[in-house]
Amino acid sequence: MKKIRTEITKGEEMRYISHLDYASAIERAIRRTKMPVAFSEGFNPHMKISFASALALGVTSATEYMDVEFKTDVDLDEFCEKIKPQLPPGIQLLQAKPLEGKHQALMALIDLATYQITIPFTGDFSAVEKAVEEYNQTKSVVYTRYSPKKGKKEIEIKQYMDKPVKVTKKDDDIIVDIMVKVTPAGSIKPGEVLKVLVENFAMPIDEAEAFIHRVGLYSDGKTPIEL
Amino acid sequence: MIKLTPAVINAVTKPARYTGNELNAVKKEHENVDFTIALALPDVYEVGMSNLGLKILYQVLNNRTDIAAERVYSPWVDMEEKMREHNIPLYSLETFTPIRNFDMVGFSLQYEMSYSNVLNMLNMADIPMMTADRTEADPFVIGGGPCVYNAEPVADFFDFFIVGEGEEIITEVADMVIAWKKEGRIGGKTELLRRVAMLEGIYVPSFYNVTYNEEQMMSSVEPICEEAKPVITKRLVADMDAIEFVRNPVVPYIDIVHDRIMLELFRGCTRGCRFCQAGVLYRPVRERTPERLLSLAKELVDTTGYDEMSLTSLSSADYSCLGELVNNLMDTFKEDGVSVSLPSLRIDSFSIDLAHKLQQVRKSGLTFAPEAGTQRLRDVINKGVTEENLEQAVTAAFKQGWTSVKLYFMIGLPTETDEDIIGIANLAHKVVNLYKEVKGRRGARVTVSVSSFVPKPHTAFQWFAQNTEEELARKQQLLKEAIKDRSINYKYHDSKTSFLEGVIARGDRKVGQVILEAWKQGAKFDGWSEHFKYDVWMNAFTTCNIDPTFYNQRERDQAELLPWDHISSGVDKGFLIREYKNAVAEKFTPDCRSGQCSACGVCPNLNVKVVDWSREA
C-alpha cells in the first residue's frame, strides 16, 4: 500500500507553532524514518503529505489527520514503529490505517470541527451563562474579520454553528464547548466565536487568557480514520 | 520554573522563539547535575540558533551527565515589554529556569553591535551588569567568541573571558567550578577566578590594573595577582578529527537564519587578506578528513531530518579535498533529496563548476567578493584575485546558466583613491558586458553591495585611521553616480553603524561606561537598522566625556600600546607590522599553504601545524 492515513496530536509543547512549521516538523520526522516517502515533481520538490485542516498558532489538538504518500509499497506497522520515536515533543501518533485506491482529499472530507476552550475565571458565573444563552438565542450574528491580506470581511457566523455553545464551570476555569460546521464556502474559528461572545454579548472574561483545544474533526459523523 | 500565560505569549510575534521544546533540546533536572550553564547569544532566537560555536559547546557540555547546558537569546522588543510588564525574568529555553539561577552564563560575542543587548539581557535576568556589583549569589558571567580578542570595552561586565576555540577549555572550566563547589566554595568567587586564571586562554579582566598617560592612551596593563598571566594566548584545537562536533543539533520549529545542517570542513584561512580579522584569529588552517566529514554528514541527516547541508568554513572552496567530498556527499544523499551548498565561492572556474554540480536545477544567484575595484587596491589588501579571475569565473557562470551575480566590495580601505571607487563601477559594468558577450543579449542582474571598512584589532590595518562618515558618504555617492547601467543594483550600508563599530572594536576599558550609558538611554539591538539609535550613542559619548574619534579616526603609532596587546592570537605583532608595510608598498604575500611561509609566528608560538589532507595523503 502506498498511502497511509494517520491520526496525530498537536500537544501543549507545540501550541505556539504555526501550521506550516508543524507540517515541516512532521516532514523532518518522516525523513528521519528513512521510509521511501514520495515527492512532487519539479524544481522545488516537496513531500507528498496532506492535512485535514490547518490549525492556528496558539491552538492544540487531540486529533489531527494527515495522509502520507510513498514511492513504493510500505508496511503499516513498520511505518508506525519507525515514525513514533522520530516525532518531536508534542506530536503523538494515535492511529494509522492504509488507504487503498482512490481517495477524496482529506481537506475536502471534513464537515465538522469541535473545540474546547478553557479560560481562568473566578467571577460571577451566571453572567457568563447569560452571555452564552443570549448568543445561542440570537438568530443572526455578524462578525467582521480583518486580514492583513484580504482586508475587511463581514461574516454571518450563526450559519456555521452546528450545536449551541455550551459553557460549564470547573474549579477556577470555565470551559466553553463549540461545534462548528466546516463548509466549502468557509467556516468560523473558535477564537472568533469567543471574541463575539466577549464583544457583542458581554461575556466577562479575558479572551487573551484562553487556551483553545481542538477536540475532533468529522466527516458525516465519523472521524477520517473511521471512514 | 517560569510559566508563560497566553496573555504574554499570544501578544508577541513569533512566539515559538520563546517556548522551547525543539527536537534534540536537552532537558536535565538541575538537582541531578553538578554544574549548570546558560549559553547566551545577545541577539534574537533566529540569529542565536544559527551560531555554530554555541551548537558545539551545547553538544560538548551536554555529553557530560553531570552538566546541564541550556540556551538563551535576546527576547525581541515586544516580548521584552511583556516580560517586564509581567515581571518575568530572562529564562532558559530548556527548563524555563531563571538565568540568575545558573552557575554560569556564557555569552558568545560575535559582533560589537550586540554589546548593548548583553547588558539588556543581564538586566532582564536581574544580574548586576557590572562585575563589581555582583555578589556571591550571582552567576559567573563569561564571554567568548571573536570579540574577546579586544575585550576591553566590555571588561567591566564580565568575570572572565575564554580566548580562542572553546570546546576543550569549557570542560576544564566546568571541572574547576564543580571542584570549587564541592569544596564548599572556599574563598568565594575570587578563589574560582584565581584558579581559572591559571588556565591558558583565560582572561580575568579584574586581575589587571590599566593605566593611561596624559594623552589618554593606555600606558600599561599589569597583572595584580600571580595567577594572572601578562599575556593571554588563545586556545585552539590541534586535531580537528579528534574532537567532538555537533551531532545532535537542536532543530528549531521556525525558520532561522541558517536553517540547515552546518558541516564545518576546517578552521582557519591562510589567504592572508589584510583587512580580515578572522583570517588571523583562526590561524592556522586545520582540516577535518573527508572520511570524518562524510560520517558526520550521514549522522547529522539522521539526527535532524534536514534536507539541506551547508559546507561551512571561512573559505570552504579552499578545502583541499573538496572535489572528493562533494562527490561522496552527492552520491550518498542522492536518494534522500538532501542538497549540499557552499556558503561562499572562490573567484575561479573551479568554484563555478562545483556550484553547477551542487545546484543541479535551481540557479540561484552567485556571490563573489572582489572586495576592491582596482588591481592596485586588491594588492594593498592582499586579495589575491585578478580581473582576469573574475572575468573567467563570471563567464563560466553565465555559460552555465546563471543570470544574477552579486559582488561584494568595501570602501574606506587604506590608500584608497577616487580611482579605486570608480573601479568598482567599471568592474560591475564589465560583468554586465560579459553577459552580453556570452549570451548575445542583455539580461544580467548584477548587485553591487558595498560596506564601509572597519579596521579591526589583530589585523595589519589595526593602526589605520578609519574614514570619517563624511568621507564614506562622499565615496558612496561618487560610486552611485559612476554606476550608469540600470541592470546594476547598488546597495550600501549605513556608515553610522560602521562608525560606532569602528569605535568599539578598537576601544579601551573607558568605552565600557559609554556602552552602559547608551544602554541606560535605550540602546539595544544596535545591529538592527530599525533599532539603531545613533543619537543615543553620541549622547552617551558626550555624557561620559569621551571622544569617539580618538578610537577610530586616529592613525595609531606602531609603538603605541594597543588595548588588545595582552591578548595573543599566536600571530606576532611584527608580522602585522610587515604586512601593513607590504600593503602600502602594494606587495603580495602568498598563501602559506601554496607559497612560502610568511613567518606569521602562529605555528611555532602555539606548537601547531597546518593540517592539509591533500598534502598529508
Image (cartoon, coloured by chain):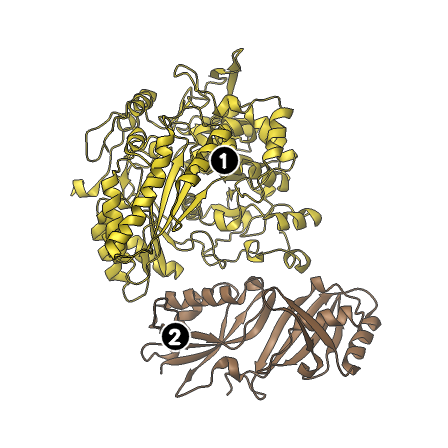
Comparing B517 with A132, the one in front is B517
Chain bearing tag 2 is A
Tag 2, which secondary structure?
helix
Residue B495 is marked as 1
Relative to B235, is A179 on the left or the right?
Answer: right
Q: Amino acid at mark 2?
A: Phe
Chain identifier, brown in the render: A
Residue A193 lies in quadrant = bottom right
Whole-percent x, y for residue A25 in the image: 46, 64
- Residue appearing at x 44%, y 44% in the figure: B491
Up-down relation of residue A50 to residue A219 (above or below): above
- Residue appearing at x 53%, y 34% in the figure: B496
Comparing B176 with B558, the one in front is B558
Q: Residues within 10 Å of mark 1 (few under 14, many from 20)?
A: many
Up-down relation of residue B294 to residue B517 (above or below): below
Q: In 3D space, how far apart are the residues under numbered discs 2 and 1 (Cα atoms)?
A: 56 Å
Residue identifier under label 2 = A79
Whole-percent x, y for residue B227 in the image: 45, 21
Up-down relation of residue B243 to residue B564 (above or below): below
Q: Residues within 10 Å of mark 2 (few under 14, many from 20)?
A: some
Whole-percent x, y for residue B563 in the image: 46, 22
Instruction: State the count of labels.
Output: 2
Comparing B430 with B274, the one in front is B430
Chain B tint in image: yellow
